[in-house]
Every structure is written in structure tokens, then in C-alpha cells.
Image (spheres, grey):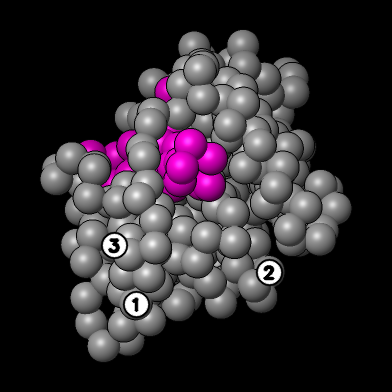
Amino acid sequence: MKSEALDLKHKELLFKKLKNIDTRISEYSFANLYLFRRNHKYEVCYGEDILIKGVTYDGKKYYMPTFDFNLLSTKEIDRLLEDIDFIFPLEYEWVKKYEDKYIITSNLDDTDYIFTLDKMTTFKGRNLHGKRNLLKQFTENYKAEIKPLVEDTKDDAIYILEQWQISIGESVADTDYLANMDAIKYSEELVICGIIYYVEDKPVGFIMGEEINNDTFVIHFAKGIKDYKGVYQYIYNSFANMLPKRYTYLNFEQDLGKPSLRLAKSSYEPDILLHKYRLSLR
């Protein structure tokens, strides 16, 4: 099977194919594939149809279909599984009929955190009282100005990203810094939209994402300068309130197995934990 490293030139080939797959799984987006191409060593493979070959964070090789998985026959599935560890990421509805023939598993580290738009626009509920309090503190202490993240504001977004990277005390290789930098630089090409936030003309935070399907908007990145207490709660809340009401859900993607990310995303009480299934030979 002919293959080549995934690059921006593959957008024309993959963008619409991935959009035609009705799923909330965050990987089914050209932007997601491009931005995390280094992490997963993505390759575009040409056969009877297009497949993406990648490597999971736990070091396993897989194929990801760019078409309806159910179009594959068991014979075709068996042939693909000769070359890799499993086919991934798959929804349970796509694979449940194969439980007697194949091994079907999921990894918590891959799981997407999904929240209702209603929850993020209100932070309602007793358990989100702390989020409402932080939001209130931010709005009482600061008057935020909101601008679109476009060519004229990209340098400000890069400033925020660099300040964030310094503040967490980790190497670039251990964070999503490079992927986030690409998202800022190539937002137009990747069809990602973003908002940037200012306090007294100083950039303090931004958020970037895209529609993943008709009812779900995926958040690829959100970065804030923590000196401004409540900045993240303000970013999430204000962005959710700006989104068109046709969206029901926000997908905040996975936690990568990082305890700090898992704690942060879990603290908002996800409405759906979207497991991504791996299908492998018995």
C-alpha cells in the first residue's frame, strides 16, 4: 500500500471525506490529524480507499478509516489487521456486531470529554459552584475585550501560548505547544475559528476549535494566563455563549493520560465520556 507523511497538501483529499463521517470523535477532522501528525506519525495510505496510519500514545500501530467503517467486509478487516495492531478510533455502534469475532477494547486515555453547551453557558448545578464563583471573580475584577483570532491578532495568541508554556514548567516535547502553534499559524487553511481575550489591551487568553458534526463543536486548544484568576472559566463560558444554538455539545478532546488534564476536564463533570474503540484480531 502506497503511503506518505500527512501534510497540508492532503487537505483537499481528506477534509470532505472526514466531514462525511457522522461522529463526535475528535480525530475525524483534518485539522486534528494535521495538528497532531508529529505525535502519531500519521501517514496517508492509498489502497482501495484512503486510510490513515498512526501510532497511539501507548505505542501501538493502527489504521483509521476515512470512510464509513461498516463498508469494510470482514475479509478486508482481516487483511488490514495483518499490518497493524488494530483499527482505531471507532464508535461502539460501529463495532458491537463484531464482538464475537474480534477483540474490542478501549483506553481511558483516548476518551473524549463531552459537555452540553447548556452546562458551559451556565455552570449550573451544585458541583459547579466553584466554576461559577471563579467566573464571577473574573467578571468583577476585569473588563474583557473579545476579538476574533485572525491574522492581526495571531502574534497576541502566540504571546499567550509562550507565556502558558513557561508557566507550566514542562518541555515543549511534553505539551501541545507545537500543535497549538500550527493551529494559530494555519487557522485559515485548517478551517479553525478562534477568539482572543484582552484585559486593558493585554492578551490574556484564547480558544480555538471547529465543528466536528452537526451538533458538536470540538475545542482543540484553550490557553490562558493564570495571573488573571478565573480566566479559563470566563473563556469557556463566554465562548459557549457565542456559539450558535444549533450545537448541543462541546468536545474538549482527551486527557492523554495526564493526571493534571484528567483532573481539570473531570472537574467540569462531563455529560458524555466518548470512548474510542480498538478492533483487533483474536
Choose mark 3 or mark 2, whichever is in front.
3
On the image, which quarter does residue 230 sit in? bottom left
Residue 170 at x, y = what percent? 82, 58
Q: Residue at x 34, y 77 (%)?
A: 133
Q: Main secondary structure of the magenta part?
A: strand
Determine the secondary structure under disc 3. Answer: helix
Q: Which mark is residue 120?
A: 3
Give the residue type at disc 3.
Met
Magenta stretch, residue numbers: 191-219
Rendered view: 249 above or below 149 = below
Give the residue type at disc 2.
Lys
| 43 left or right, relative to 265 | right
Label 1 environment density (alpha carbons within 10 Å; few <14, some 14–19, many ≥20): some
Q: What whole-number distance in Å separates the C-alpha atoms at marks 3 and 2?
A: 23 Å
Front residue (pair 131, 77): 131
Choose mark 2 or mark 1, whichever is in front.
1
On the image, numbered disc 2 is attached to which residue? 258
Determine the secondary structure under disc 2. Answer: loop
Front residue (pair 134, 202): 202
Task: Tell me, yes or no, if residue 46 can be seen here.
Answer: no
